[in-house]
């Protein structure tokens, strides 16, 4: 008889996962399941499917090599969902208890919470200790404050873990945040930037690719060339490669965009962090060892992982299940087809979407200021945009995708996460990228047929939502311009926007 049946989910691929902490090799069994429901609940990018399934199979092999008793269930149509498959396995193994580390997504947690009653077997859900901040700890912080600024949370984490902090609890370098130094445009003759580490698909990955080619042809995106790491060893090498080749300039060019540079100085590590191949504690410790690199790069990078990543997870668990129910601007437009096929004259959108199709990756500013900004000012319904982001990126899991999409880009939560909507006109995109020079639209033109759609949609968004936003002190300049705007100009903006939105 099996003592504990330990269920490991597809984003818990780590020997340090809490469910394995007290495992006894002779008495306990590990269960990993590939199931249709997880593969089909979103239109996952094909590269995301290969990444997760291949990494799961590699991890199961590693466990077996270390003499753990593992049952690994490969997908076929009969493997419907976690619960049905677990029920089937429990009949075979009759475990005394089931153990699992807290699922990262609300949807899966709710499924797990039903197991005890359904199977009549005790189920223990353990804390996910990979994160810096416990769910309860975030709730305590959130309940004690009027506003939930990321910056305050981040400083609290820095102090708690003594990261970039001196003996007097003061930030190293004198400032908590070097955001101001993270906004450089990439100069024209900037040398070619080293690419992230390319990992050649091994036999396990090739088999997944072959299986997917047969079974999941309808999923979004290009399956090949597949180059992601699918083992901890290769993910650690990708981390070392980032630290060696790109970290130095991560800070200054964090907000830059360039047509032929898909990754710039970004780490491309979220895909490994989110499924357990990399541990965020280890990543930060390795980065901190690079004491000779500019503080704006080190602090900038630490802020993303210790600050933003932990903060959005906290927001997610604090506000779910209601978080995705809001629609502050009552945005109702349908997501245009070009989000799926890249067929648009807007060069910035075309580039970001085509890159997403190819790589299952876009860096933060592309997600925020191009595809996200457009969705906001074009008034696309939040649910449709959230589904898109959840599908198309290899790092997309609801706990991190939803706050970024629903909160950060769409402001659909009414300002829980952000203090103002991140709306921007073509001017910002032109300042931070080279997309406009190859565009059929003219970024300098504000209205009419050749005008950049971001220009009139930007003003249309604020005109439409004036009542909801005009009291926001951070938008004072925007509404002061609107107050001085002629009625003719407003009419033109509304008319151009109406015509454009109709073509979507
Ligand atoms: P880098 O720029 O190198 O940053 C380093 C690390 O910091 C990342 O690997 C990531 O773990 C973390 N990080 C940075 N920004 C954020 C953030 N805002 N929230 C959480 N973690 C962050 N990230 C995901 O991991 N999964 C998602 O599904 C996801 N969806 C997003 C949707 C939208 C609309 C936006 C605006 C952002 C989203 N992000 C998401 C956050 C961020 O864009 C990605 O983490 C980042 O682009 C991943 O690339 P990178 O590893 O090269 O990141
Ligand atoms: C995203 C995903 C996919 C595509 N497939 C599986 C799978 O077959 N088995 C599995 O355990 N997990 C998979 N995942 C991840 C889950 O959808 C989900 O994100 C995690 O269980 C965390 O809640
Ligand atoms: Fe994008 Fe406008 Fe620039 Fe074209 S002109 S690339 S639509 S910002």
Image (cartoon, rainbow, N blue to C red):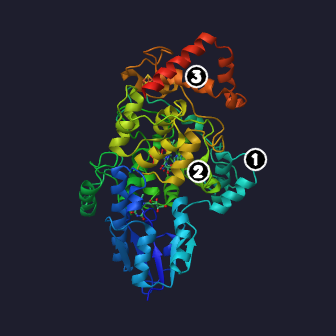
Disc 3 and disc 2 in contact, CB within 8 angstroms: no
Image depth: mark 3 or mark 2 in front: 3
Residue behind label 1 places its C-beta within 8 angstroms of ligand 1: no
Give how far apart the Cα atoms at labels 3 and 2 are. Answer: 29 Å
- Return the x and y of residue 95 as percentages of the image width and height: 47, 84
Image vertical order of residue 451 relative to residue 415, above or below: above
Q: Earlier in the sequence, mark 3 or mark 2?
A: 2
Q: Earlier in the sequence, mark 1 or mark 2?
A: 1
* The C terminus, quarter of image: top left
Residue 36 — which label?
none
Q: Secondary structure beneath disc 2? A: helix
Residue behind label 2 places its C-beta within 8 angstroms of ligand 1: yes
Q: Nearer the viewer, residue 502 or 456?
A: 502
* Residue holding disc 2: 312
* Residue holding disc 1: 146
- Return the x and y of residue 3 as percentages of the image width and height: 48, 86
Tell me the crowding category of disc 3: few under 14, some 14 to 19, or many 20 or more residues within 10 angstroms, Cα based.
many
Q: Is residue 248 visible?
A: yes
Image vertical order of residue 332 relative to residue 383, above or below: above
Disc 1 and disc 3 in contact, CB within 8 angstroms: no
Residue 459 — which label?
3
């Amino acid at each position: 008889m099996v003592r504990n049946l330990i269920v490991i989910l597809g984003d818990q691929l780590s020997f340090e996962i809490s469910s394995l902490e007290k495992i006894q090799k002779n008495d306990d069994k590990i269960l990993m399941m590939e199931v249709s429901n997880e593969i089909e609940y979103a239109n996952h990018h094909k590269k995301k499917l290969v990444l997760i399934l291949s990494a799961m199979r590699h991890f199961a092999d590693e466990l077996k090599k270390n003499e753990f008793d593992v049952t690994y269930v490969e997908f076929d149509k009969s493997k419907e969902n976690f619960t049905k498959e677990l029920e089937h396995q429990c009949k075979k193994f009759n475990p005394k208890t089931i153990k699992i580390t807290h699922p990262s997504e609300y949807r899966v947690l709710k499924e797990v919470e039903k197991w005890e009653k359904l199977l009549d077997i005790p189920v223990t859900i353990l804390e996910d200790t990979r994160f810096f901040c416990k769910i309860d700890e975030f709730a305590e912080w959130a309940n004690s404050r009027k506003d939930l600024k990321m910056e305050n949370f981040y400083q609290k984490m820095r102090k708690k873990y003594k990261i970039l902090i001196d003996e007097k609890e003061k930030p190293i370098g004198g400032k908590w945040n070097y955001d101001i130094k993270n906004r450089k445009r990439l100069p024209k003759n900037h040398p070619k930037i080293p690419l992230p580490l390319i990992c050649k698909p091994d036999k396990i990955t090739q088999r997944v690719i072959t299986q997917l080619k047969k079974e999941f042809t309808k999923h979004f995106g290009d399956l090949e060339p597949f180059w992601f790491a699918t083992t901890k060893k290769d993910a650690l090498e990708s981390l070392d490669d980032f630290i060696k080749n790109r970290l130095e300039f991560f800070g200054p060019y964090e907000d830059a965009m360039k047509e032929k540079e898909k990754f710039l100085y970004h780490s491309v590590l979220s895909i490994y962090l989110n499924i357990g191949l990399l541990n965020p504690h280890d990543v930060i410790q390795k980065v901190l060892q690079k004491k000779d690199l500019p503080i704006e790069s080190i602090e900038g990078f630490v802020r993303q992982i210790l600050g933003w990543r932990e903060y959005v997870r906290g927001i997610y668990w604090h506000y779910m299940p209601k978080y995705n129910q809001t629609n502050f601007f009552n945005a109702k437009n349908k997501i245009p087809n070009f989000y799926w096929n890249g067929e648009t004259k807007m060069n910035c959108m075309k580039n970001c979407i085509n890159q997403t199709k190819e790589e299952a990756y876009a860096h933060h500013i592309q997600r925020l200021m191009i595809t996200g900004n457009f969705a906001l000012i074009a008034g696309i319904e939040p649910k449709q945009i959230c589904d898109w982001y959840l599908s198309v990126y290899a790092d997309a899991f609801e706990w991190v995708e939803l706050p970024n999409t629903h909160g950060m880009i769409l402001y659909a939560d009414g300002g829980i996460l952000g203090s103002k909507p991140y709306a921007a006109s073509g001017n910002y995109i032109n300042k931070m990228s080279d997309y406009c020079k190859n565009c059929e639209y003219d970024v300098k033109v504000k209205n009419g047929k050749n005008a950049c759609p971001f220009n009139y949609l930007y003003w249309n968004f604020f005109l439409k939502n004036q009542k909801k936003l005009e009291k926001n002190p951070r938008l004072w300049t925007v509404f002061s311009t609107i107050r001085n705007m002629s009625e003719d100009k407003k009419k033109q903006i509304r008319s151009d926007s109406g015509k454009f939105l109709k073509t979507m």
